[in-house]
Image (cartoon, helix red, strand yellow):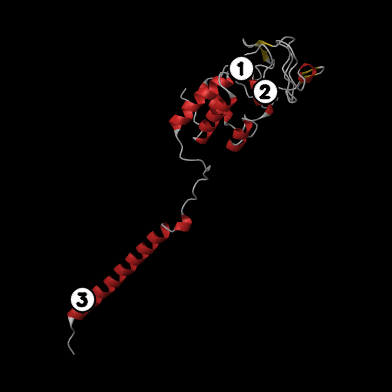
Amino acid sequence: MKHDPSKGIRYLIYVKTLTLLSVMIFIIAAAASAFRTDDMPVEPIKLGFAAKDSIASVKAFETVYKTLMSPRCMNCHPAGDVPLQGDDSHLHAMAPKRGVDGKGVYAMKCSNCHQDTNTPGIHTPPGNPEWHLPPAAMRMVFQGKSAHELARQLVDKKQNGNKDFKKLIEHADDGLVLAGWNPGEGRTLPPVSHAEFKRAWLTWIENGAYAPKK
């Protein structure tokens, strides 16, 4: 019986073809596995606000900033531990100190002079049941801050009392914040109404709480 060389060549071609097909199937399977949807990164959590607008946010913060830097707000957010006083933001007479809880030290407590309501008369102590400075552990300084610095500080949970965006929005109607628009006789009001301030506050936050450039 004669040996047919062509059969050996056909067999080798058959083996090589099977090997090549096996390699291709392995590559396709590996590629498909790499793109499985259950291995894809989880989408970041969304805040639920409308599309962000950095220009509108920064523009709104102009109103927020000039309000917070007015004496009615800044006087209770001093760089030191003595509150500020008057439209010129001078150091408070008798130099009361912040204290651990922001309500004064020893016999010089804020509530000794600042009652639940404004005391009648020009330049007499304004009143509020919660009158105090921010506590020592969370001083929340406004005095001397640039717009960029203050915006960054306001949204920093380590500096703002652990407030998220929702709590920051609610804070616009805090009783002590509202007292800035009822400061007692002889004191100038903030540069805009509370309604205008709140609109700007909401616009700033809901559009991403962007900080102005340095």
Q: CA distance from mark 2 to mark 1?
A: 10 Å
Badge 1: residue crowd in 10 Å (few <14, some 14–19, many ≥20): some
Dot 2 or dot 1, earlier in sequence: 2
48 and 3: which is toward the camera: 48
The residue most toward the right is 107
121 and 98: which is toward the camera: 121
Residue at 73%, 16% (x, y): give it: 97
Front: mark 3 or 1: 1
Dot 3 or dot 1, earlier in sequence: 3
Residue at 58%, 36% (x, y): give it: 165
Helix, strand, or loop for circle 2? Answer: helix
Q: Which residue is mark 2?
A: 179
- Which quadrant of the figure contains the N terminus? bottom left
Tell me residue 208's x, y (percent): 50, 35
Tell me residue 68's x, y (percent): 58, 21
Tell me residue 119's x, y (percent): 75, 16
150 and 14: which is toward the camera: 150
| Residues marked 2 and 1 touching at CB (< 8 Å) | no
Look at label 2 and name its amino acid: Ala
Tell me residue 145's x, y (percent): 56, 19
Dot 2 or dot 3, earlier in sequence: 3
Residue at 52%, 43% (x, y): give it: 48
- Can residue 149 be seen by looking at this rendering? no
82 and 180: which is toward the camera: 180
Q: Which residue is mark 1?
A: 189
* Placement of 179 over or under 14, stated as above or below: above
Front: mark 2 or 3: 2
Looking at the image, residue 173 sits to the left or right of residue 25; the answer is right
Q: Which residue is mark 3?
A: 9
